[in-house]
């Protein structure tokens, strides 16, 4: 019995010794942990948020007819530059049968009234010459005759307007020739020859014949998520990039933030607008998609480190870095930070350009393997 116990103890000691030696061997074979170091650098740090949107004209003018009819001719196309009063299109009036008939009846009625007032006037004139009536009666008859002439003339003009869309003596107030009201570029011609158009009046907006705008006055119109709206304010600079125009950044100024947001795809979006400082040599087409970088803060040529090098105290939450003081020796150094762009953070106090800062990425080397 004693012999068995002795053998068991010896075997246990041998196994434990073998395991201990194997463990020491493995520990000796592991690579030592070393840390890289980096130095601070001078950087230009820009803190910004991005809004998506498009480039549109500051003002668009819709050219509408003042008479209904059918487009007979079109004299311009998209991209043409027009001056005020330039000819755009011509409308052919298709008279309404009922309106045309009423206009004819009005002419006949006013003609009957005119003939009657003419006879009465000549009769009153003869009686006045014989001293039968007073001058007042003669003048009243003369006024009625003149009014009858005017009504007959107006009835004929109204007939011309119903039949052709224009009449002598009215100038451009009723005309089949559609002209531009402002100078600018033709952005769109939504009608074609043969299309029927409706006049603009108090009860109808009318058919848009052309869309004009000043392409030298463009704005960025986009939307910002509610999570970012508290960071921006009017007057901040914008950097506009247009997807269709490579390697060009357009400067702008944020001059409008919508006071009310709209729910879109489960998130509240606020509309923003910024006036573009367009480069004269670059043509920007209306409606192009664009991104606006809203510059929240900017620091030029400041001392900065990568954000990955900065640590925070668990209790005070104050930032600090570890500076190299010797071979594999580091010491903590509290710092004061400024703005950050997510990659670099500005350092206001605590370190210099010569300090070596510990990188928190362990790097295994081949030292000790042999």
Image (tube, rainbow, N blue to C red):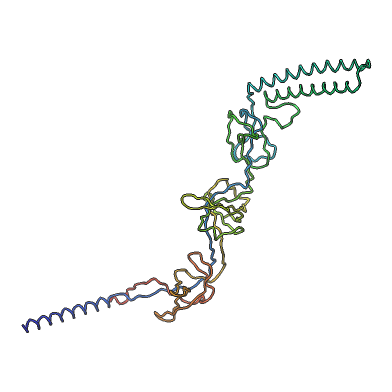
Residue farthest right in this picture = 131
How many badges with numbers are in the image?
Answer: 0
Q: Is residue 22 above or below residue 121?
A: below
At a point 56% along the width and 54% down the height, the residue shown is 240
259 or 3: nearer the viewer = 259
Q: Does residue 333 appear left or right of residue 132 in this picture?
A: left
Q: Is residue 50 above or below residue 304?
A: above
In which quadrant of the rendered image does the C terminus lie? bottom left
Q: Is residue 146 above or below residue 256?
A: above
3 or 215: nearer the viewer = 3
Q: Is residue 149 above or below residue 187?
A: above
At a point 42% along the width and 79% down the height, the residue shown is 330
Q: Tell me where residue 341 appears, x and y as whole percent.
A: 51, 64
30 or 253: nearer the viewer = 253
At a point 56% along the width and 69% down the height, the residue shown is 301
369 or 323: nearer the viewer = 323
Quadrant in which residue 93 is drawn: top right
Quadrant in which residue 175 is drawn: top right
Q: Tell me where residue 320 appears, x and y as whole percent.
A: 47, 75
Q: Tell me where residue 87 appears, x and y as whole percent.
A: 67, 34
């Amino acid at each position: 019995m004693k012999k068995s116990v002795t053998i068991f103890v010896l075997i246990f000691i041998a196994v434990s010794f073998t395991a201990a030696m194997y463990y020491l061997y493995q520990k000796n074979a592991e690579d030592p942990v070393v840390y890289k170091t980096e130095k601070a650098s001078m950087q230009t740090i820009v803190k910004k948020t991005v809004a998506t949107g498009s480039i549109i004209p500051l003002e668009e003018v819709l050219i509408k007819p003042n008479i209904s009819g059918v487009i007979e001719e079109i004299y311009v196309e998209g991209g043409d530059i027009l001056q005020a009063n330039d000819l755009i299109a011509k409308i052919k009036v298709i008279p309404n049968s009922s309106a045309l008939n009423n206009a004819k009846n009005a002419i006949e009625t006013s003609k009957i009234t005119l003939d009657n007032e003419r006879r009465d006037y000549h009769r009153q004139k003869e009686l006045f010459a014989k001293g039968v009536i007073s001058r007042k009666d003669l003048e009243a008859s003369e006024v009625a005759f003149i009014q009858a002439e005017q009504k007959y003339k107006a009835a004929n003009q109204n007939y011309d307007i119903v039949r052709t869309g224009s009449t002598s003596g009215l100038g451009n107030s009723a005309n089949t020739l559609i002209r531009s009201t402002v100078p600018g570029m033709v952005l769109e011609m939504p009608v074609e020859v043969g299309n029927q158009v409706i006049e603009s009046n108090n009860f109808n907006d009318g058919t848009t014949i052309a869309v004009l705008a000043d392409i030298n006055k463009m704005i960025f119109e986009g939307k910002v998520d509610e999570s970012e709206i508290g960071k921006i304010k009017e007057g901040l600079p914008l950097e506009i990039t247009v997807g269709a125009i490579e390697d060009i950044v357009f400067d702008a100024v944020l001059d409008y933030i919508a006071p009310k947001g709209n729910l879109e795809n489960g998130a509240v979006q606020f509309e923003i607008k910024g006036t573009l400082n367009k480069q004269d040599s670059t043509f920007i087409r209306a409606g192009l998609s664009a991104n606006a970088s809203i510059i929240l803060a900017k620091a030029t040529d400041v001392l900065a480190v990568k954000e990955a090098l900065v640590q925070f105290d668990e209790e005070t939450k104050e930032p600090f870095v570890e500076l190299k003081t010797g071979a594999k020796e580091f010491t903590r150094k509290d710092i004061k930070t400024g703005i950050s762009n997510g990659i670099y953070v500005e350092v206001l106090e605590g370190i210099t350009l010569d300090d070596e800062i510990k990188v928190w990425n362990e790097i295994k080397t081949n030292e000790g393997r042999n």
